[in-house]
Image (cartoon, rainbow, N blue to C red):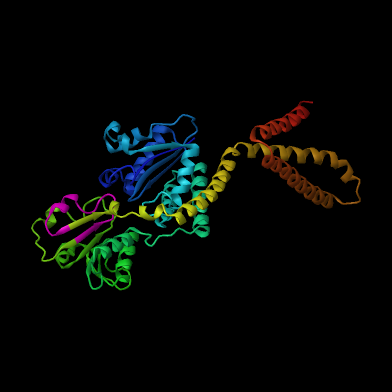
Amino acid sequence: MIQMIGTDHTLAPVNIRSFFSFTKEESIQFMTQIQQNLQASGVLLLSTCNRMELWVSTKEDQPDDLLHEICLFKDVQEDRYRRFFHGRTDTAAVEHLFSLTCGLKSAILAEDQILTQVKSALSFARENYFTDGVIEVLFRMAVTAAKKVKTEVTFTHADTTAIAQAVSMLKEQHFHLKGANCMVIGNGEYGKIAANTLVKNGANVTVTVRQYHSGRVEIPEGCSRINYGDRLDYLPECDIVVSATTSPHYTITYQDLLGMHPDHPIILIDFAIPQDIEPRVAHLNGFTLYNVDDFHSDDVAGSETNQHAFLQARSILEKEEAEFWFWMNGRDIVPRIHGIKDQAVEDYNLRMRKIIRKLPLDADEQQKLTSEMDRAVGKVVARLIFDLQDHLPDDAFRECIAGMEKVYQEEEIG
């Protein structure tokens, strides 16, 4: 059984998503708990700024209480948080993942980051020995399907990242980015995207770098750098501060800014989950705080062009999902097909042995001919059986397999 449970930007506000986010260390501890408590054969945790999802593969047909396991790890009562989560199993879960991976469920329609995040989640689970065959194939096929959608389907949107949305919003408010002093806290993937976007819009951008990394960390072209520890000293000179780290602690706290009296308004933008900037900062004079939930592309999702693109994408995904279920439902059949093939080859070999011995060939030539014939017969039998699988309903095909197995079992008894 495939089952998942998750929360996202449509179900929970940013403070709830922050609470249910996981660091890498916590992810390992939590997935270990799931494997032990649920006897799960495969586990994967997807934790991003917009969502947290737990994926589990088990041999049992009854779904487990995944929310209980999440709340057990977080040491809270599940009844208090149940409304923020949605669970899915099997077909619904697979459909959700394929749509999610190509950006159809993102806050910014068809954005590219989610594909990278899904790939990273799979790699992390694999490297720490939490995946099984089902999780591996499911997520790899979802990634392949997403790449196909991105190649063949065009969505119309001007802004494909949250920072691009933020820039558009600032321009609509007549804020002039050209020449503005901006500080980006965090030099990870999204910090670099934010810095590059601001530079392209004419801002003067300074990126924070942890002191122990300062000698070897690359920063985006056109940016200055300061040590992370100097961020609060530099902050009063800024017009915009963007924070996008993976730290479990605040990069800017209420107390940090309490005694600060800037001579101009400062915009703070928090793209992190868990949150980088303490929410209480929004109550301080001179500061305007935005978080990741303030930037969406809902206005373009319902356009006529995008509705058509959505239907195109779903058509592609439905075919790819069918391919996954073909693999999933045939996992138990493949070894049986190979067993029938091997028995057919052995049967043919026995029937042809006397004929081959009568040919004017030495022993090595006879063995080579036998091997070539065995290989050819195996291919013919396997192709015949797999073609039957393509053209027969699943129940009828399984009856055929059982019938073939019975023929050889009776011959062995006889």
Q: Position of residue 307 (x, y in %)?
A: 46, 52
Number of numbered discs present? Answer: 0
Residue 350 falls in image quadrant: top right
Asked if the stretch drawn in magenta spans residue 120, the answer is no
Q: Position of residue 50 (x, y in %)?
A: 34, 49
Q: Which residue is at the front of the view, 409 or 206?
A: 206
Asked if the stretch drawn in magenta spans residue 286, the answer is yes
Query: Which residues lie in the magenta part?
Result: 267-287
Residue 208 falls in image quadrant: bottom left
Image quarter of the C terminus: top right
Vertical placement of residue 128 versus 205, above or below: above
| Residue at x 58% of width, y 38% of height | 329
Q: Which residue is at the front of the view, 271 or 340?
A: 271
Residue 195 falls in image quadrant: bottom left
Vertical placement of residue 265 versus 374, above or below: below
Image side of residue 330 versus residue 42, left or right: right
Is any atom of residue 1 visible in this view? yes
| Residue at x 12% of width, y 57% of height | 257
Q: Position of residue 347 (x, y in %)?
A: 79, 37
Q: Position of residue 94 (x, y in %)?
A: 49, 42
